[in-house]
């Protein structure tokens, strides 16, 4: 099958230096596994949305290192660097993203963007002078990211569903006005059916197991970062909140802390939660369970560090540059069609 005729599966993974095991098992690993297992039937595009990184204020002196770190994380998580069906690239290296975003801006309603819940949430947390226009039209750039490559499948978290709906809207809007320009991505429901429910698997905070593990936790005690020192991480497991029931059962409502430890146990050992829960069900020592999980976490982090160290940077850079050259061609072709449609370029005869 020709690469360009395969359906396109595309997603952007935000540059983020402090990825934790919740992000790793809930988002990164499933995506890398999917890329690996589906690259024969789908063209896979995994890119770093570096232009999206400063829609809210960041420390710019760290950005370049974060972008490279992110790409190395893909490789350490198992992304094959020799698979021609998988493309990796940095958004800002393909200028068509920015150019198409401007054109889309002019077909996007102010009211439409004002209704985006992520914008409302994020802007509510910032003082007015720090709410950038970039944050406001974040979804417009995201639509350009997707539509430039004709992507049908776009695995994203629930927080991005509204942006995906907007992408479909703007694609249809321009298709209606100018003829069939864009592949309209599948509706959110179809995306969920396609990607399955496991994507929703969530690791909880160790200290407050009623909420999911999230980097916004100030103390960091409830979070295991991929970059944590393995001993420190083991101590965090030993300090995890449990309950006073005293018997191990997998019961997220009544025993959220214990159930969370069982979940982490299952993810680290590659077993099902059911199998792990059955094995420990009825145990009366929380300490033993904690010790076991703490050892596992230690081994996992040690192993992951080694994988990160052994990433072949030359091979990574070579692939990145080759893919960016190829994707520039694909994206520029699409951009030209849009420029022709809106009258910025003479129509092809
Ligand atoms: N907004 C996405 C997130 O925060 C990242 C992203 C940017 C993206 N552009 C994209 C995801 C295009 C999918 C497709 O997770």
Image (cartoon, helix red, strand yellow):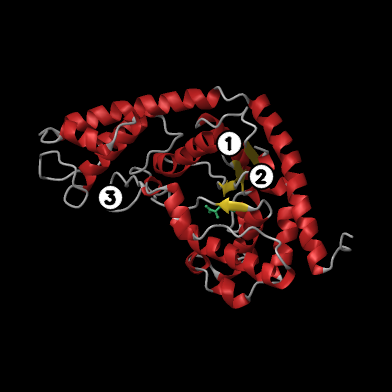
Secondary structure found at label 2: helix
Query: Is label 1 in a helix, a strand or a loop?
Result: helix
Q: Which of the 4 image quadrants contains residue 242?
A: top left
Task: Give the alpha-carbon distance from disc 3 to disc 2, as whole Å.
Answer: 48 Å
Tags 1 and 3 touching, CB below 8 Å:
no
Q: Along the horizontal axis of the image, is 191 left or right of 255?
A: right
Where disc 3 sits, the SS reads: loop
186 and 323: which is toward the camera:
186
Q: Which residue does the numbered mark 1 point to in the structure image?
A: 69
From the viewer's perspective, is residue 3 above or below residue 161? Answer: above
Image coords of residue 229 (percent x, y): 41, 30
* Residue 169 falls in image quadrant: bottom right
Bin the neighbour count of mark 1 within 10 Å (Cα to Cα): few under 14, some 14-19, many 20 and up: some
Q: In front here: 283 or 337?
A: 337
Q: Alpha carbon of mark 2 to alpha carbon of mark 1: how far?
A: 32 Å
- Residue at point 68% right, 35% down? 320
Q: In the rendered structure, which disc, 1 or 3, sits on the residue that comes first in sequence?
A: 1
Marks 1/3: CA–CA distance: 29 Å
Q: Residues within 10 Å of mark 2 (few under 14, many from 20)?
A: few
**Image quadrant where one finds the C terminus:** bottom right
* Of pointers 3 and 2, the one earlier in the residue sequence: 2
The answer to whether 75 appears left or right of 182 in the picture is left
Q: Name the residue under label 2.
A: 5
Report which quarter residue 291 is drawn in: top left
> Which residue is found at the position 42% from the left and 24% from the top?
302
Q: Which of pointers 3 and 2 indicates the residue nearer the eye?
A: 2
Q: Mark 3 points at which residue?
A: 208
Q: Nearer the viewer, mark 2 or mark 1?
A: 2
Quarter of the image where the N terminus is located: top right
**Percent x, y for residue 164?**
54, 60
């Amino acid at each position: 099958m020709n690469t360009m005729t395969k359906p396109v599966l595309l997603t952007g993974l935000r540059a983020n230096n402090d990825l934790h095991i919740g992000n790793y098992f809930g988002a990164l690993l499933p995506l890398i596994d999917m890329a690996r297992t589906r690259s024969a039937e789908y063209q896979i595009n995994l890119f770093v949305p570096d232009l999206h990184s400063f829609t809210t204020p960041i420390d710019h002196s760290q950005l370049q290192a974060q972008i490279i770190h992110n790409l190395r994380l893909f490789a350490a998580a198992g992304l094959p660097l020799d698979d021609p069906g998988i493309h990796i690239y940095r958004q800002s290296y393909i200028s068509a993203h920015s150019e198409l975003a401007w054109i889309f801006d002019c077909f996007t309603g102010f009211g439409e963007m004002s209704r985006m819940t992520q914008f409302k949430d994020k802007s509510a947390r910032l003082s007015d002078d720090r709410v950038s226009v970039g944050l406001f039209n974040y979804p417009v750039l995201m639509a350009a990211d997707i539509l430039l490559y004709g992507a049908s499948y776009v695995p994203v978290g629930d927080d991005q569903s509204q942006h995906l709906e907007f992408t479909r809207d703007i694609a249809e809007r321009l298709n209606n006005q100018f003829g069939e320009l864009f592949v309209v991505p599948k509706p959110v429901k179809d995306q969920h059916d396609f990607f399955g429910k496991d994507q929703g698997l969530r690791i909880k905070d160790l200290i407050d197991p009623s909420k999911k593990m999230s980097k916004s936790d100030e103390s960091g005690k409830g979070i295991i970062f991929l970059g944590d020192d393995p001993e420190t991480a083991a101590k965090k497991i030993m300090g995890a909140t449990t309950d006073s029931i005293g018997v191990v059962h997998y019961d997220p409502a009544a025993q959220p802390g214990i159930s969370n430890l069982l979940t982490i146990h299952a993810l680290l050992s590659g077993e099902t939660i059911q199998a792990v829960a059955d094995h420990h069900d009825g145990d009366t020592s929380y300490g033993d369970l904690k010790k076991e999980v703490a050892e596992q976490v230690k081994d996992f982090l040690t192993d992951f560090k080694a994988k990160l160290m052994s990433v072949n940077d030359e091979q990574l850079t070579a692939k990145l540059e080759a893919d960016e050259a190829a994707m520039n061609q694909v994206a520029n072709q699409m951009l030209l069609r849009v420029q022709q449609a809106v009258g910025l370029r003479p129509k092809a005869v």
